[in-house]
Image (spheres, rainbow, N blue to C red):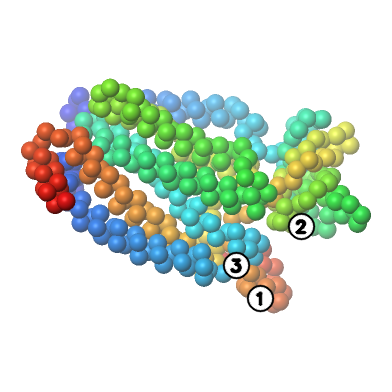
Amino acid sequence: MWQALVRWFHRWTSPKIFYQISRPWIFWSSVAAIAILAVALTWGLVFAPVERLQGNSYRIIFIHVPSAFLSQAIYLAIAIMGLVGLVWRIKLAFYAAKQCIPIGASMALLALVTGAIWGKPTWGTWWVWDARLTSMLVLLFLYLGLWALHNAMERQETGDRAAAILALVGVVNLPIIKFSVVWWNTLHQPATLKLTQAPPMHISMLIPFLMAIVGFYLAALAWGLSRTRLEILQREPNARWVREELDQLGSAR
Amino acid sequence: MNPKRKQRLMLVLLGTCGVAVTVLLVLFALGQNMNFFYSPSDIARGEAPFDRQIRAGGMVREGSVLRDPTSLRVSFVVTDFVEDVTVEYEGILPDLFREGDGVVAIGRLNGDGIVRASEVLARHDETYMPVEIADALERAGYDSSKYDY
C-alpha cells in the first residue's frame, strides 16, 4: 500500500510524466469548478436569503471566505513543495511552487479587497489594523517577496531555493492568521466554519457557501496545474520531448 | 531515507521551528498591544491610559442607549458582562450598531471613566440567519440569538 503510494508520487515528480498525466486533471477540475462555481455564486449572490442583521452585504462572504481560505492553503502548499524541493531535490516541486505564487497572491488580494468592501457597510470602516487584517496583509507581502526573490536571482535554481526558504520561514504566519481572532480581540469576527462544532449559519446559506469553497479549490487546482505545465516547457527547453511538444504546439497554430 | 537527505530535512525543519518559536514568543511578549481594543474589564483594572486615544470594545448593554432628541449626541454602556464603561459620542452610528451587539468605540478615556468617542465601529458575530427565520422565531416567542443551527 505504502509502496504503491510512493510509486504513484514518484510518477508525478517526473516533469515529462507530469506534463502528460496532469492534462485530464486540468480538464476535469476546470469543468467541475465552472459548474460548481456557477451554481454556488448564482445561489449565493442572488437566491440565498437576506441576512437578519447584515441584509444583503453578507453575500460577499461567498467570495471573501473561499479566497481567504485558498490564499492560506496555497501558501502552505508552496512551503511543503519548497521543503520537498530542498530536501529531495525534486525540480518539479520548485516549478509548481513558483507557479502557485501568483495564484496565492491574487487570492490574498481578493480576500483583502472583498474584506474592505464588506467592512465599510458592516463595521463602518474599510480597514483597521487589527491582528486578523494585519496578518493577512503580511501574507500578501510574503507572496510578493517570494515572487521578487524568484525574479531577483540570476540563476533560476538559486531563486527556487531562496524562495523555498522564505516560504518555510513565513509558515509561522498561517497559525497567526488562523488564531488571531482567538488569541487577541479583533474587530474581525471569529470563524464561522470550525472543525469542532456545527457552523452557526442557516442551511440555506451554508450549502452555497461550502460549494463556493469547493469550487474555488478546484479552480485553483486547474490553474496551478496548467501554470506548472508552462513552467516545465520554459525551464527545460533542451529536453527532447519538450522540443517536440513545442514544435507540435507551434504547428497547430 | 539516505543520510544526506535526512540531514537536510532536519536542518530545514529545525530552522523553520526556530523561526516559528521566535515569532510566537515575540507576539506573546507584546501581550495587550496585540489586542485591537480594551475590554471594560481591562479599563476597570486601569490598563487603559487616560487622555490618549484608545479603543474600547464589547457589547452595547440592552436599554442603555440614550439619544439626545435635538442633536446627534448619543451615550451608551459597553459591557463585557463583568464590567461596564460608558461611551459618549456625537455623530452618525454605523448601520449595524444596535443594543446587544458588538461595538468598538475609538476615543479618549477621561477621569470619570467615560470614553468620549470620535468614531464608533460596529462588530458583527459569526452567525448568519435569514431574516424570515429570525422573524418567525420572534413571532413564536423564541430568542433568535439563541437559535441552535
Q: Secondary structure at mark 2?
A: loop
Check disc 2 and give the amino acid type: Glu
Check disc 3 and give the amino acid type: Val
Q: Position of residue A146 (x, y in %)?
A: 38, 31
Q: Residue at x 69, y 77 (%)?
A: B140
* Marks 2 and 1, how far apart at CA: 20 Å
Q: Residue at x 22, y 44 (%)?
A: A229
Which chain does the residue under circle 2 lie in? B
Residue tagged by mark 3? A50
Instruction: Evaluate whether label 3 is on the same chain as label 2.
Output: no
Residue tagged by mark 1? B136
Residue tagged by mark 2? B99
Q: Nearer the viewer, residue B86 or A50?
A: A50
**Residue A202 as seen in the image, left or right of residue A38:** right
Q: Nearer the viewer, mark 1 or mark 3?
A: 3
Q: Secondary structure at mark 1?
A: helix
Q: Nearer the viewer, residue B53 or B143?
A: B53
| Disc on the earlier residue, 2 or 1 | 2
A207 in relation to A183, above or below: below
Q: Position of residue A114 (x, y in %)?
A: 53, 50
B132 in relation to A237, above or below: below
Check disc 1 and give the amino acid type: Ala
Instruction: Evaluate whether label 2 is on the same chain as label 1.
Output: yes
A141 in relation to A72, above or below: above
The number of numbered badges drawn on the structure is 3
Q: Position of residue B106 (x, y in %)?
A: 74, 40
